[in-house]
Every structure is written in structure tokens, then in C-alpha cells.
Amino acid sequence: MTKSLKWNKIGKVFDPTQYGLINGCKEFAQSPQALEFNDFVRVYFSTRARDPENGKFLSHIAYVDMSKDFREILKVSNTSVIDLGVLGTFDEHGIFPINVMRHDDRILAYTCGWSRRSSTSVETGIGFAESFDSGATFEKLGSGPIVGASLNEPFLVGDAFVRYFEGKFHMWYMFGIKWAVMEEEAAPDRVYKIGHATSMNGIDWKKEEGLQVVPDKLHENESMALPTVEFFDGRYHMFFCYRESSDFRNNSARGYRLGYAYSYDLKSWVRNDKLGGAVVSKTGWDSEMQCYPHLLKMGGDLFLLYNGNEFGRFGFGVLKLVRNSFDRIQN
């Protein structure tokens, strides 16, 4: 009988409201994504400030350095990690999230740039940047995206998660399938799924155009975002977050939850959210929502970073895998 993964809940480990952040940001530490160093772990996140011209949010990238057990905060960044785009570019109004990885002594970043529209709220694309100062700041390859809208994925390409497996770069990402007015007198809402692409150099990508790699659980209008993949104990594990595509902001029953799938070949994914073992708490900071997961393999252990209520307004938390729980998964 197949049993779920088991996690020790370390709890919420960072609250952005307790620190002075960059660019006047006061709340939100969304999509925590970690990079291991010798003596600490750096967690990048998206935080928000108000655009002085119109009062809308702008998403900026910051980071916090923590001890490897996530119990101690060592440093919070006080300068911009990466600049937003100039007028008219794909990341003019925010970067959320940023996925950072090491490869051949380089530190690479894949960004999700946001730009506002009039008929719909936003458009997104995937950018590329590299750090030359040990991950403190990142320089963009150029002003445009390396992956964006295309013939069969016409909008909302973003949320890239990139790893180097089996001799090539693999990217899992979000792509939109439609915008629609789903509630009377409401603004259009978006529906998006998880796709896959490969690359030999990390910059030029071949998408499996329009292919949804993780099946729906709720219905065809289920939205899925922020895939994260790690190889551990003989298989590839993917976490992501999913929700209803309307009435999700104020109705916790329709809000984000963490989904789970596994694969042996990076092609076929078996979805079984119960196996993931990550469930909302009965009370507290993640009792209404769990979203924006990130898997981190470090020191022989597997950690899962994620946001809780209100889309990470008050920070992120961590789960640590109970090491022998994999032994209980039978095919």
C-alpha cells in the first residue's frame, strides 16, 4: 500500500514585516527559493512596494541568509538583487518569482517578469540573469525574455524552475490557457497549467508546446503554478500549488493548496497530492492556504519551503522530510 511522505514542520521561519526591506517594501516574502552556501543557506523571495504613480504593487527581489537548520536569521539584503525592467519591457512592474541555481561554478537565475495590461491584469515572461558576486546581485542577459508567449501558449508564460538533469537543462513552468470572466461583474481571471522545456545551454529552450505535464485534479479550470522538482531516493519529485481559478482570494476553501507528482523518467508524471503529505494546519499562519513551494536537497536531507495565508504576506515556512518516509512508498 502506498503511503504519503512524512514531514517535520519547522514552522514559519521568516516574517518580512519584522525587517526593513529594499525599495520601501514592508510585506510579502513570496516564493522562497534557496541557494546553499558552505556555512548558510540564502533564500530569495519576492516582496512588494506600492507604485507611487498609481498605488499598485511592484514586486522586487530580496533575500535572507539563514543557518542551515533555518533556525537563525543571519542577514537580510539591503540593496536591490535585480533591477526591474525599463518602460515597456516584460518585467517593468515586477519580478515574481526568481529561481536561482548553480551550474559549472556559475550562479544562474530565471525570472518571471510581470507587466500590466488594460484588458487583463497582467502578462508574464521568463528572463535570464547571472550573478558575478556570489549571488548578491544579478545582471540580466538582455531586456527581453528568453521564453515567452508563442503560437500555442499565447499568454502567461512564467514561474520557471530549472535544474540540470541527465545531461541537459530542464525547465518546468506555468503557461496560461485562457482568460475568462468567471463571476458576474468580476474582472477576468486566468487559468494556467504546468509545462516542460529543455535546453543544452540554459538560454535557448525547446518547449513541449501546449503540453500539460501534470493532470488536473479539480476540473479543467484548475490553475497550477510554481513547480519545483528534485531527485531524491530513486525518483523525481514535483511539488506545485493549485487552486480554483475564481473566488480564491477571500474564500480559503478555493485557495491554494500544495500538489504532488512523481516521475522516474522526467516524461511521465503520476499525480497524487495525498502522497505529498503537506497539508494546511488547523490553526495559524498556514491554516487557510499553502502556496509557492520550493524543494531543497541539502546535506542529505530534503526540505520544502512554502508560503502560507494571504499569498505569503507575512512570510514563509519550512518542512523537513522524515528521512525513512521514502521507504514506505511502494510502487
Image (cartoon, rainbow, N blue to C red):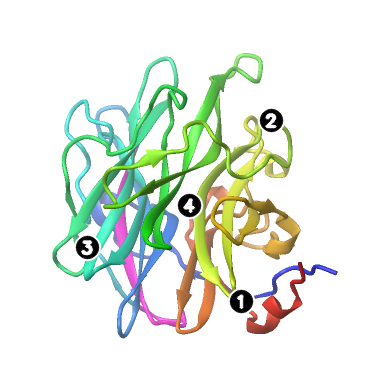
Q: Nearer the viewer, mark 1 or mark 3?
A: 1
Mark with earlier residue (1, 3): 3
Secondary structure of the residue carrying numbered label 3: loop
Mark with earlier residue (2, 4): 2
Q: Tell me which residue sits at (56%, 50%) in the image.
A: 267
Q: Residues within 10 Å of mark 1 (few under 14, many from 20)?
A: some
Name the residue tied to disc 3.
78
Residue 26 placed where, x, y %? Answer: 35, 53
107 left or right of 149 in image = left
284 left or right of 315 in image = right
Q: Tell me which residue sits at (30%, 48%) in the image.
A: 60
Name the residue tied to disc 4.
313
239 left or right of 329 in image = left
Q: Amino acid at mark 2?
A: Glu
The magenta stretch is 58-73
Q: Tell me which residue sits at (64%, 20%) in the image.
A: 182
Q: Amino acid at mark 1?
A: Leu
